[in-house]
Amino acid sequence: MIEVKNLVKRYGSHLAVDHLNFTVESGQIYGFLGPNGAGKSTTMNIMTGYLGATEGEVLINGHNILEEPEAAKKSIGYLPEIPPLYLDMTVKEYLDFAAELKKVKKKDRKSEVDHVLKLVKLEEVEGRLIKNLSKGYKQRVGLAQAVLGFPEVIILDEPTVGLDPKQIIEIRELIKELSKNHTIILSSHILAEVQAVCDYVMIIAHGKLVASDTPENLERLLNGSETIELTAKAEETRVREILSKIEEIETVDYKEQQDGTTDIFIKTVDQKDIREKLFHTFAEEHCALLKLNLSRITLEDVFLKLTQEETGDPEQKKSGFHTGKFDSEPDTESDIEIPEEPSVSTNEEGGEDDESDL
């Protein structure tokens, strides 16, 4: 579907994208994550043909985006962070114009625009000027132009930025609906959003791919993610005696409190869930448990660990995260961050939104 090979982009002495390699397969939602200045938008702008690369290539269905732009772009729909809208057009006029630009056949144009209006739920506002729409509706119009022509891949750069919670939920549901027929690449700073909608996550830092896997695997593989946390109504000596009866415990840390309780943090052999056994063991010893829960590392923890400036042991970063589809060495040095290349936009500046969203 999409192959990014040895991609490099330099701005003077700054290396924004550093020998980046990955492959996007069809039929999934990919989350593309990274801190500001990591090279996300630069990479996406190269993938869509807006920017040229210093080195490397991007292949879309076998077509090089720079050498065969027209053939490659037929397979891509793109929604920049700032939607490319003409504010003095109505929604319908704008989508007709976008369909013409995308060379949708004239005989199919009306039916395709009508279908997209229904798909993105814009039928109620199709006759209104875009400048009078709320931000949520403007985002939908931008998404509608990306869907026109029904490309195989839709690339979305921060599609929910600036939206209220209700609008965010609506856009998420729309992305899930689109994923039934399209491959989605979603760039976002909202980790909960990525976790909620994405099948696969790519994390980029300092222009390099540092992790690529499912959200669940990233959480599980990072340093043996699960810890059982307990609070027992007993002193540490008594707790140690009780836990000595459980063979599955690999490591345990204790923190005795002034109120006579002890906090316990347990890692088990092969990450076995022994909460039920712990409960019965403490009950048999007539020792009350005030807390018993399983604590898992989150995608946010993974993101922070992999994108922090001081990486620690570089070998630790390389373990466990790369699959056969990805082949880029993790970064081991801190880079100077500069603002990302702005997304291409053809919109005119409008005033404040004066209509509420659905």
Image (cartoon, rainbow, N blue to C red):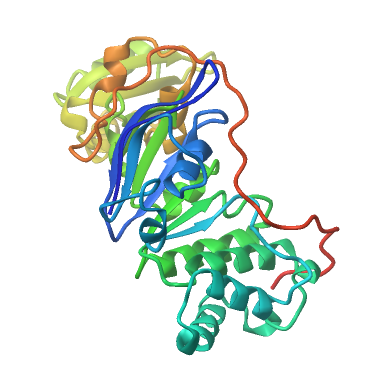
Q: Dividing the image into 4 quarters, which one contains the C terminus?
A: bottom right
Res. 26 image quadrant: bottom left
Res. 122 image quadrant: bottom right
Which residue: 31% across, 47% down?
59
> In this view of the protein, which residue sits in the foreground, 184 or 308?
184
> In this view of the protein, which residue sits in the foreground, 253 or 204?
204
Looking at the image, can residue 194 be seen?
yes
Residue 319 left/right relative to 132: left
Question: Where is residue 294 shown, x and y percent of the image?
Answer: 35, 36
Residue 68 left/right relative to 172: left
Which residue: 14% across, 24% down?
247
Question: Where is residue 333 shown, x and y percent of the image?
Answer: 42, 12
Residue 114 left/right relative to 24: right
259 versus 177 height, above or below: above
Which residue: 27% across, 54% down?
1
Which residue: 49% across, 72% down?
148
